[in-house]
Image (tube, rainbow, N blue to C red):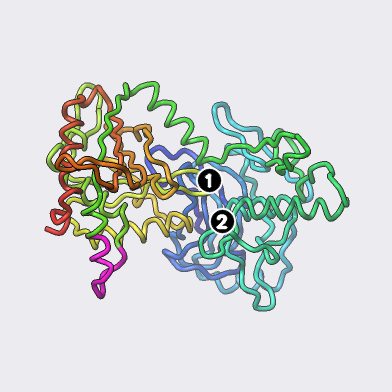
Amino acid sequence: MAKLTMPQMGFDMQEGTLVRWLKQPGDQVQRGEAIAEVETDKAVVEIESFHTGVVKELLVAEGTTVPVGTPIAVIDAGDEADTAQAETEATPRPAAPADPAVAAPAPGMPAHAGAATGPAAVAPASVAPSPRVQDGTRRPKASPLARRLASEYGVSLQGIVGSGPGGRIVKQDVLAAVTAMRSEASGAAAAPMAPATAPVGPAAPAPAVPVSAAQGSDALVPMSRMRQTIARRMAESKQQAPHFYVTMAIEMDQAMALREQLKQLPDVPPVSVNDLILKATAIALTRHPRLNSSLEGDAIRVHGAVHLAMAVALEEGLITPVIRDCHNKSLVEIAREARELAEAARAGRLKPEQYQGGTFTVSNLGMFGVEEFAAIINPPQAAILAVGAVTEQPVVRNGQLAVGRIMRATVSADHRVTDGAQVALFLQDLKAILENPLRLLV
């Protein structure tokens, strides 16, 4: 017998929440095959089996939070694998206990709705299998958070139309379905529905169902693990790093014209404005390495490579997948990799190595119509670039008034690592590159 334990995905990971089992007792599993989805403080990722054999027992229920290194499943990897599989198929799977015991959260650790924390959370009892697809019905595309809420409120995902990318069901869709079901059941405004299974013991409150503004009631929604981590890290960054901000306006007429020209080329993937910014940032950072640095005690580590992180908005918060060695990649390579990383992030398929190790971050809110903003530094990095929308504005060229397309870029920098003059020089180079965008192609 071999035990599968909660892996450590990231040097600072201390615990993880088991979102969904992809295998059930009796299923065959190969070494390297995905066996479960786990929510860390940064993303929901698939974990792989380290053994080949038959899944004999699941030790942790879906939604349970356990420390790193805790056994979560037993895999029969020996000669008795065939026997174990036969016994499992011949014996009906037990249902989940009606009143599962929930351990109290360990001091300093966040509580989770319906989930226990700490070693006491793991009991070698049978775990209810996750819903399977019956009669050939395809499993609906849904975010892990949406699946969890649907399970808590007893809502079927089959009848919900997703509003996320590619028709993916997200949190708001499930909550809207719950509210509609509540209204249909009562014929009028009624008290919020309780989850289908109420945990026993000291657990955090379940997510509250939003109510309409006409009712005038508040909705208390607990923070996800990702949101808790964002809150903690951003508060630490703002408290510990002395931020200062430098903004510069950049004329984007030539860059936008280049983008239109690239659209006409066959076999060239679409290049977005953000892709142009990423490439220009990587070039500028090679000329101003102090901004591509991090503080380590009383020393400054100047990174030799530009591992560019880009902020991607998810339902649960922000995540920053990393384009590694961005300074050595072409504009087309950056555009292709940026798209793949963004799609993987929104689908919850990012691996830890894909969102760790960034040396500088670009945050773009231009697609939302935001003209200018200042971002908070993502520690341990020394700076972050915030870019707004490209808008038509009056400009003066050769003493004449004209209409130009302007983008404002703001660098938030750590004054312990760099100074205003260095940031200004970086922005000057960034501006020169984007205003003469042929540099992006050489």
Viewer-nearest residue: 17 or 27: 17
Hey, what amino acid is under mark 1? Glu
Viewer-nearest residue: 317 or 393: 393
For residue 185, which quarter of the picture?
bottom right
- In the rendered image, residue 97, in percent from the top left (x then y), is placed at 76, 51
Q: With 325 as the anchor, is 141 left or right in this view?
A: right
N-term mark: 2 or 1: 2
- In the rendered image, residue 325, in percent from the top left (x then y), is placed at 21, 51
Residue at disc 1, secondary structure: loop
Residue lying furthest bottom: 136
Residue found at x 69% / y 57%: 128
Viewer-nearest residue: 269 or 320: 269
Residue found at x 62% / y 41%: 121
Bin the neighbour count of mark 2 within 10 Å (Cα to Cα): few under 14, some 14-19, many 20 and up.
many
Residue at disc 2, secondary structure: loop
Residue found at x 41% / y 50%: 367
- In the rendered image, residue 369, in percent from the top left (x then y), is placed at 43, 46
Res 359 seen here: no
Q: Quote the CA–CA distance across marks 2 and 1.
A: 10 Å
Hey, what amino acid is under mark 2? Ser
- Span highlighted in magenta in the image: 258-270
Residue found at x 38% / y 50%: 352
Q: In the picture, which quadrant includes the C terminus?
A: bottom left
Asked if disc 2 and disc 1 are in contact, CB closer than 8 Å, the reply is yes
Q: Which residue is mark 1?
A: 316
Q: Magenta segment: does it hold 206?
A: no
Q: Which residue is mark 2?
A: 143
Q: With 419 as the anchor, is 85 left or right in this view?
A: right
